[in-house]
Amino acid sequence: MKRALLPVLAIVASPALAAPIDITVWRHDTGDAEMVASRNMVDRFNRAQDKWKVVVETIPQGTYTESITAASLVGHLPCVMAIDQPAVPNFAWAGTIRPLDRLLPASVVQPLLPGGRGTYRGRLYSVGQFDVVLALFARRSRLAAEGIRVATIEQPYSARELYDILLKVKRAGHYRYPLDLNGKSTGEWFSYAFSPWLESAGADLIDRGNYLRVDGVLNGDAAVGVARYYGRLFRDRLAERNPADDKSFEQGRSLLQYTGSWKARDYSERFGADLVVMPPPDFGHGPRIGAASWQWAVSSSCPYPAGAAAFLEHVLSAPEMAGFSHMTGLVPVTADAAALTTHYRPGGAWRIYFDFAARYARPRPATPGYPAISAAFEKAMADVRAGKDAAEAMDEAVETIEHDIARNGGYGFIRREAVARQ
């Protein structure tokens, strides 16, 4: 009798029949299309194998980052978390998330555009499926009516050419404010939209060689020149300081708008073939745009890193990335995924956004000090828009950032001269 039970017990104990192990995933609550796309992606992973089961917990976006911080203090973090890429270095510095270099194979990471990676001190800490890009939007018929050429990847507008175009149109009296700079947006918009202008001019928010030096970078001649250019757009009434709404371009009150690819679907439906998508202006070193949006990271306390890695490999696969893009309209961050989409494949109606992401995109500075940097730059640019002297505004930003870096012990970065003395 006992011998007869042995095969049955062996079957019951077989790993093949064991329940899958739960992998808890946190994400923030977003729009309906993105939530449905995410749910479908998780369902496909859970159906495709029986070793792991992803269980998603959704948290309101307004309290999301605070929830991660609070959970890390009491050791209740999930295995996988969605994190806004500029915040990744801060979580890495705090030890909340683990490096992914050895967790994910190079074949999965290598194809990712810059917008698909989050790093700190040269190591990979997060990976993403999508990005958005900045562009100059216009209507072909209206440019033609003003005798203005369409800027292209091969021949973008220089900053000077763009200014001259705006001044010409302003003097013609056809537009009260010919350029819409998305003036209703606040917060991170300033750094996301206008720090690429610094980079295009050969400047930056901070020296990325050591992530410690700000003086001479953010307040150097090139950076101050960009800030003065920005202020002149408002002083000369080429852009509106305090717009009443965000409908200026779509209602025909502005000739050009500087905004993001999140407008792609709306503007394509509204203007059809008359819509023109052009590169941002070139301040001397080629156009630049910000890179990276929400990405996936693995907590340091995750007891099943292999399961977390399996899930990340799944979401980074070309079919999953393409499917997510199809439902949300967001830009996929690999060429293989783009090729599987209708809009972003070579020859697709929105291919230009992928080309911008591949050619112009650069992530925001990979330092835990980025929130302080961004806040200081936002204040400086807001002050310049209001009429403050550009050099003074940038000097104040430098002082604020340097104080923050010193107060936080350099955020894990060490000056080379200090290393040489050790």
Image (cartoon, rainbow, N blue to C red):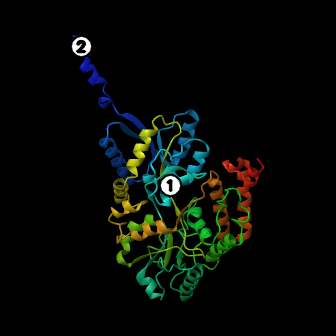
The residue indicated by pointer 1 is 117
Q: Position of residue 414 (x, y in %)?
A: 70, 51
Q: Nearer the viewer, mark 2 or mark 1?
A: 2
Gap between marks 2 and 1 measured at Cα: 56 Å
Q: Amino acid at mark 2?
A: Arg
Question: In the displayed structure, does residue 61 sit left or right of residue 48?
Answer: right
Q: Position of residue 353 (x, y in %)?
A: 43, 68
* Secondary structure state at the residue bearing disc 2: helix
Where's residue 142, x and y in %?
44, 83
Tell me which numbered mark, 2 or 1, is placed earlier along the sequence. Answer: 2
Q: Examine the image and state in which quarter residue 380 appears.
A: bottom right
Three-letter code for the amino acid on which mark 1 is drawn: Arg
* 356 shown above or below 292: below
Seen as rendered, the residue at the extreme top is: 1
Disc 2 + disc 1, Cβ < 8 Å: no
Residue 402, x across and y down, in percent: 73, 56
275 vs 127: above or below: below
Residue at which label 2 appears: 3
| Residue at screen point 24% across, 16% down | 5
Q: Residues within 10 Å of mark 1 (few under 14, many from 20)?
A: many
* x 59%, y 63%: residue: 190
